């Protein structure tokens, strides 16, 4: 496993380099000129040219890319055209909302889906299996933003026990901040829990028919012990794959829910940067999302080797 790490890390670095080049090239092709947006359509050509020179927009594409990449390696992600502050600070500020939201949502999804999927597999054709199937289908079919609206109507408007939106900031205290993230995390977790329930049930059912489970039962082990000591651990590879994808989706794809609850997260920052044509922020946020996806896939690949000795033997 250790011998494999340098090759995997080299592949990771090369992938990130190619992705960064693609992101920069695509952003450069987007219509509109940031200098024109900042100064307005009535700006004089001389003023516009001076601002473009100040922002480095008059440089060749390759030079601008290399300058941006060098800044990324130094931790200098540039200055936002719209907010006039360093982009690194913006991302860290918004990540303080999005990361706890994603962690709460994935924890809730796991807490619901893993036990439900395992019970559905162990009682195939029974009431729990039918209930898990209904829950999975409904939660996948219902959009997260619609669940968010229902939660606001029920718990905020009708019962008045939860905040309808906004984020007080961690300086206001841990509980007020977590309370503001509870309903958004539930809205995000339910669709993911439906997918994870179905994957867990299918993976556990597959392992329950393997030779090693039949051997364990033949040795006299109880059905419960066979299920949790043999079937479930050997079903973890597809479950971990889905969890890795879900975590990156919850960080990068929560823009609708963040807008419904008026949360200052990364998804909302990306949406605002796109609408305001803030190329620097857009580039850096998209690069962050892409890096998160690639690194998460790398971690999931390594976890395969950790939980399944058979994969290490083939290295």
Image (tube, rainbow, N blue to C red):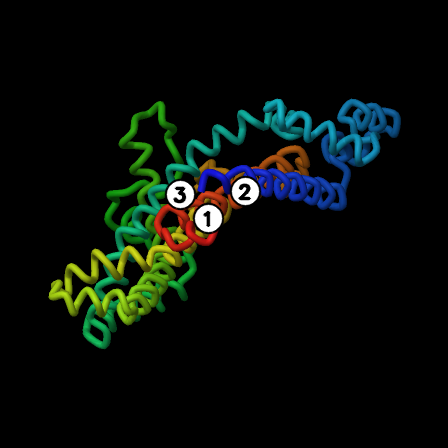
Q: Residue furthest right?
A: 46
The residue drawn where x is 34% and y is 64% is 203
Q: Residues within 10 Å of mark 3 (few under 14, many from 20)?
A: many
C-alpha span from label 1 to label 3: 21 Å
Name the residue: 64% across, 30% down. Answer: 82
* Residue 31 in the figure: left or right of residue 166: right
Using the image, tell me which numbered label, if any, was put on residue 301: 1
Q: Is residue 252 visible?
A: yes
- Does 242 sit left or right of 26 as displayed? left
**Disc 1 vs disc 2: Cβ atoms closer than 8 Å?**
yes
**Quarter where residue 232 is shown:** bottom left
Tell me the quarter of the image containing the N terminus. top left
Residue found 77% across the figure and 38% down from its top: 33
Q: Earlier in the sequence, mark 1 or mark 3?
A: 3
Quarter of image, res 56: top right
Q: Is residue 173 above or below residue 264?
A: above
Q: Nearer the N terminus, badge 1 or badge 2?
A: 2
Q: Secondary structure at mark 3?
A: helix
- Looking at the image, is mark 2 or mark 3 nearer the viewer? 2
Instruction: Write the residue at 63% across / 28% down.
Output: 72
Query: Measured along the vertical axis of the image, is residue 181 above or below residue 204?
Result: above
Helix, strand or loop at mark 1:
helix
Question: Does residue 125 lie above or below 178 as drawn?
Answer: below
Q: Earlier in the sequence, mark 2 or mark 3?
A: 2
Disc 2: which residue: 8
The location of residue 4, given as percent across then percent down, is: 50, 42
């Amino acid at each position: 496993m250790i011998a494999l790490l340098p090759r995997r890390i080299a592949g990771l670095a090369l992938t990130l380099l190619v992705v960064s080049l693609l992101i920069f090239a695509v952003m450069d092709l987007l219509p509109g000129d940031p200098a024109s947006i900042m100064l307005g359509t009535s700006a004089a050509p001389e003023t516009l040219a001076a601002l473009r020179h100040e922002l480095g927009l008059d440089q060749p594409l390759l030079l601008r890319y290399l300058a941006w990449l060098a800044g990324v390696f130094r931790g200098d992600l540039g200055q936002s055209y719209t907010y006039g502050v360093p982009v690194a600070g913006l991302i860290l500020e918004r990540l303080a909302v999005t990361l706890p939201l994603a962690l709460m949502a994935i924890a809730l999804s796991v807490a619901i889906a893993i036990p439900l999927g395992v019970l559905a597999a162990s009682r195939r054709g029974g009431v729990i299996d039918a209930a898990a199937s209904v829950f999975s289908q409904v939660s996948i079919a219902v959009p997260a933003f619609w669940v968010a609206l229902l939660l606001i109507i029920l718990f905020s408007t009708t019962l008045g026990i939860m905040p309808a939106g906004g984020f007080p900031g961690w300086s206001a205290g841990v509980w007020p901040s977590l309370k503001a993230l509870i309903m958004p995390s539930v809205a995000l977790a339910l669709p993911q829990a439906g997918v994870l329930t179905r994957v867990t049930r299918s993976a556990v059912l597959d392992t329950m028919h393997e030779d090693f489970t039949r051997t364990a039962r033949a040795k006299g082990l109880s059905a419960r012990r066979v299920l949790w000591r043999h079937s479930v651990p050997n079903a973890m590879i597809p479950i971990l794959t889905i969890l890795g994808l879900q975590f990156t989706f919850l960080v990068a794809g929560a823009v609708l829910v963040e807008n419904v609850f008026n949360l200052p997260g990364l998804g909302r920052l990306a949406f605002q940067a796109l609408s305001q044509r803030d190329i620097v922020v857009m580039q850096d946020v998209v690069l962050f999302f892409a890096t998160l996806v690639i690194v998460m896939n790398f971690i999931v690949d390594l976890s395969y080797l950790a939980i399944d000795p058979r994969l290490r033997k083939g290295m």
